Amino acid sequence: MSYTAHHLDELPSELLTTLRQAASAVEPFCLLETGQAHGAGPEQLNRQQFLAAGGLVQWHRIPRASSEAWERFAAAWRKEPTWCFGVMGYEMRHAFEAGMDRHEGQLQDDMLLFQPLWVVDCGLTGEVMLHLHDQAPWATSQLWWEALQSSQHEVDSSSHGPVNWEAEWTDAKYLKEANDLMQHMQRGDIYEVNLCTRHQVKGLALNPLTVYQDLLHRADAPMSGLFAAADHWLISASPERYIQLAKSDRGMVMSSQPIKGTAARFDDVHQDALSANSLRNSLKEQAENIMIVDLVRNDLSRVAEMSTVTVPRLLEVRTLPTVHHLVSTVEGLLREGCDWLDAIAASFPMGSMTGAPKVSAMHLIQSHESSTRGWYSGALGYVRPSGECDWNVIIRSLVHHAPSQAWETWAGSALTLQSDPHMEWEECALKTHAVKASMQSQPS
């Protein structure tokens, strides 16, 4: 079974609008967007403006992660390399690290990927290609386009009342857990850990497409995406790239861009510049970022050609509409005989959402957080038949359970010995602001 490529003449903007509006009528559906240029300009690693997939050839599901389940999936993909889109949740860590406990009560599968009937790939130059699977019911790109247009729905932009979020933790609870973890640092058990907490709202009948469009309007994040499958929607305004594999004349290049360091934006230009400069020059934020860079370097070196892991960009300030971030880029050349599945197994879950050392940090996260993270701090993305792939870090995101009309979002912050837990709690609030605001009203 294979895909046939067709060139699409539709304007990328028109096509993107139609894809967004058709999302609720296509099952399953995934849309990945790279956002607009901010700060220093377009991200060098971006390979397309957007990538969309829909319809079902087959599922690749792992309800509860184990090394055996991962190996079965890996064997199936290697036997027939193909397009896959979807989510690997945080609990996929159980496939790569034995002896981990987990909280119960998770509604989502640990891994939910699908092979689509069609893929739309819009390159950076605006060229658009449609890949139709042999099983697709459309013989031509025109028939597919007409079917997509007929399935789209106007996005409901009506306003609604206040959304009453229920925070899992009070500030006092967060401070207690943070201080406990810092005692572990004083004993040398860990050097850095990402402590996260959940926010929920239940019984809210709101169109996920409305929320997605509003969140993109506010955040314009470079690794955004929408995933609709079964009973769940994932709405992501992630600014962070977990891992990308891309072919080059040297071979397959692995790239990861951990974020550690966040500062608020301000309307006043002078104050905003001071905020960015303070972030850039903060020894504390630099130390947090470099610790995770070292962890990522170690992870990638497990599957990289010897002496090819480098850090071509260290401690860059990336400016987004709602925040400034401190971002570093780690690269390595994938070892001959390895593929994207090996790169995931070597590096998941991402260091920026765990800590250092990673295994010790994960054990302490499990004992100090109150709920399963589910899809949060996992990865949303895709893989091509060539083995090239790109996955974000699921942060600044919402998970919607349609049958119960329940929504949840999470926020976390890195703790080191230099951290002030009160300021870290305030940073968590900053990170959820745009996500929560996207459910209050629509763009003006």
Image (cartoon, rainbow, N blue to C red):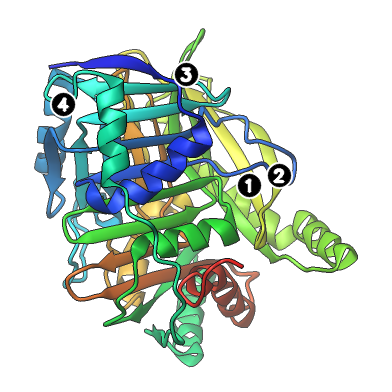
Kind of residue indicated by mark 4: Ala
Q: Residue at x 52, y 56 (%)?
A: 216
Q: Is residue 355 visible?
A: no
Calculate the distance from the C-alpha at mark 2 to the C-alpha at mark 1. Answer: 5 Å
Look at the picture and state if 262 lies above or below 8.
below
Q: Nearer the viewer, residue 82 or 428?
A: 82
What residue did someone put label 3 on? 306
Q: Quadrant of the N terminus?
A: top left
Task: Tell me the mark number nearer the camera, choosing from 1 and 4.
Answer: 4
Drawn side of residue 78 relative to residue 72, left or right: right
Calculate the distance from the C-alpha at mark 2 to the C-alpha at mark 3. Answer: 26 Å
Look at the picture and state if 193 lies above or below 29.
below
What residue did someone put label 2 on? 316
Residue 226 at what x, y percent from top left? 37, 51
Task: Tell me the mark number nearer the camera, choosing from 3 and 1.
Answer: 1
Residue 327 numbered mark, or none: 1
For marks 2 and 3, the one nearer the N-term is 3
Residue 293 at what x, y percent from top left? 56, 44
For marks 2 and 4, the one nearer the N-term is 4
Q: Residues within 10 Å of mark 4 (few under 14, many from 20)?
A: some
For marks 1 and 4, the one nearer the N-term is 4
Asked whether the residues under the numbered discs 2 and 1 touch, taking CB atoms below 8 Å apart as contact, a structural biologist would say yes
Drawn side of residue 324 relative to residue 8, left or right: right
